[in-house]
Amino acid sequence: MSRAPLGVLGGSGLYQMSALTSVREERLKTPFGDPSDAYILGAIEGREVIFLARHGRGHRLSPTEINYRANLCGFKMLGVERIVSVSAVGSMQEELRPLDVVLPDQFIDRTRHRVSTFFGGGVVAHVSFADPICGELRGVLAKAARTTKVRLHDGGTYLCMEGPQFSTRAESHLYRSWGVQVIGMTNLQEAKLAREAEICYATAAMVTDYDCWKADEAAVTVEEVVARLGENAHNAQAIVARALAMLPETRGCGCGSALASAILTDRAQIGPEARERLRPIAGRYLG
């Protein structure tokens, strides 16, 4: 089994993992600021897991306010090689019902006000992002989900909107015309930063509602979403616990070398401040 701890990012409704034992908390300072909350370190059946509530405990941070760079950098500093993101989403397709689980393999970015890279400030890097989800990790999640009672949809496109408002009806119909499966507000930045940090990343998207496109359904409300968060959180924890037992000891994907040929900047032109800032993410490539 994997010796590196599994990272779990909990979204709306999943602020802790009840199955964790030997629990302790660790607060980190990263070169990119403070993460959303303390990292919760523990184990499930002897396998190490590190959990972070992306909105902070008590749901204090809106999707735009989350410090995605600090969150992902902190996982990297703690030795995490794989991250499972558990996220509440709206369904954009009739067949994707509330309480279903979707494992997206693609993203569309509709955010506007967020930093989505560790680089810049004197260092330029371009990672491949054609396939934004780690296929190996998503495959493990699919196998784990099939051992539970959830209704699983393996594959699909997650549209990441800015929020915090829900969609207008015009937007919702536009996104449906693009053929997307689910809509959410957080996972795109995480996926991009995980790739730059050479961390495997996969999303378990937990459907709470039909957004506002469905004519025979009332427009989505917070009350409707909250009513389904508890059951979704229970299902998510069951999937993660079973996935742990199925993870290969070593990674067979290419996520762990995503930066190998991505940094274009002449190393001699990289100053000490930039080197120090990027050390947790790309230290082995900067010399």
Image (cartoon, rainbow, N blue to C red):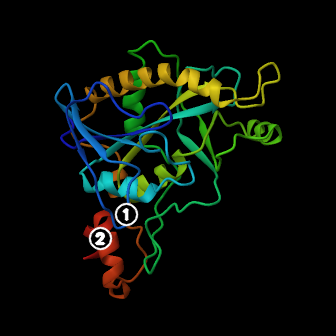
Mark number for residue 285? Answer: 2
Element type where label 2 sits in the image? helix
Q: Looking at the picture, which amino acid does disc 2 mark?
A: Tyr
Residue 6 lies, with reference to residue 154, above or below; the image says below
| Residue 134 found in image quarter | top left
Residue that mark 1 sits on:
259
Cα separation between marks 1 and 2: 8 Å
Q: Residue at x 38, y 67 (%)?
A: 261
Residue 57 lies, with reference to residue 224, above or below; the image says below
Residue sitting nearer the eye, 28 or 155? 28
Image quadrant occupied by the C terminus: bottom left
Whether residues under marks 1 and 2 lie with C-beta atoms below 8 angstroms apart, the answer is yes
Q: Residue at x 46, y 62 (%)?
A: 127
Residue 20 lies, with reference to residue 55, above or below; the image says above
- Residue 222 left/right relative to 63: right
How far from the left and from the top, in percent, is residue 49? 26, 37
Mark number for residue 182? Answer: none
